[in-house]
Structures are given as structure tokens and as C-alpha cells.
Amino acid sequence: MTVLSNLYKMLNGHFGWADRVYVKSIPSSAPSDSTFIFITDSTQQIKDFGSNTFQNMQYDLEIQVFYSTKSTLDYDSAELDLMRFLISNGYVISNVRGRVQDPDTFQDYQTIIVSKTERGI
């Protein structure tokens, strides 16, 4: 199972404030009055070289939280809850880009980059 699939399984249905989790693409039918999490692959890096090979693979994943246009959710609390959950499951927070507004849907969204190292590949 891929690291992206594992992340989807972890996040799907875990947070009561998120209506859905989308992977790799957001359908055009996704309603702007729902809050959802969108996850995609970012980069992969081979790590820990020795004996003419590598021992580990680091996967970077991008997580975006799109907030409902009608949201009364405390964004900071939701994002901190998400980040704590990720850290407790072995992910490292690499970057938090800051909230912006999608020009098409007018949804505020936050982008969080996480990494996960898989051993023994």
C-alpha cells in the first residue's frame, strides 16, 4: 500500500469537522459549502546510503484543508488538531504555507507539507 493510500485511510472519517477527504484531484462537483481535506504526493527522496544502496525512502505529501464558505470553524484549532494527529502517527511537519482564498470557490484553505520516512525499502 502506498504512503498516500495509508494517509487517506488515516484521515478519512477521523475528523468530525471534515466532510470528505479527496486524493489526487478534487471533483468539480465538490461543494464549496463543505469542508474537506485534499491530499497529494509531493516528492520522494532516497535516504541513508550505505553499501552502494539506500536504506530508506522519504515521502513528502501535501495536505490542503479547504474550509466551507459557510464555516464557523476555528481554523487554528482544526489545523493544530490535524498536525498533532499527523505527528502522533509518525509524520513530520515540513512546512505550513499559510491560509489563502481559492479565487474560484472563495474557500479559505491551508496547505501543510508533511514527510514520512519508510524504512527497509
Image (tube, rainbow, N blue to C red):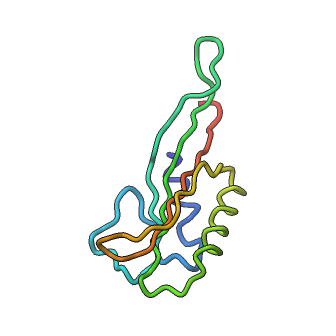
Whether residue 20 is visible, yes or no, is: no
Who is closer to the viewer here, 60 or 15? 60
Q: Is residue 61 above or below residue 48?
A: below
How many numbered circles does the render carry? Answer: 0
Identify the residue at horizontal 32%, vertical 75% (top origin). 105
Image coordinates of residue 102 in percent, x first then y, are 36, 69
In the image, taking residue 6 as reference, residue 120 lies left or right, namely: right
Relative vertical location of residue 107 with respect to residue 114 in this rendering, above or below: below
Q: Is residue 20 above or below residue 93?
A: below
- The image position of residue 55, as x and y in percent, is 63, 25
Q: Is residue 85 left or right of residue 40?
A: right
Which quadrant does the C terminus fall into?
top right
Residue drawn at the location 59% of the way across and 22% of the way down? 54
Q: Residue most toward the right? A: 88
Q: Is residue 87 left or right of residue 15?
A: right
Which residue is drawn at the image coordinates 56% and 64% (left, top)? Answer: 11
Q: Nearer the viewer, residue 51 or 65?
A: 65
Return the x and y of residue 108 as percentages of the image width and height. 44, 73
Q: Position of residue 82 (x, y in %)?
A: 62, 66
Seen at 63% across and 52% down, the residue is: 93
* 66 versus 52 height, above or below: below
Q: Is residue 121 visible?
A: yes
Residue 15 vs residue 35, the one in the foreground: 35
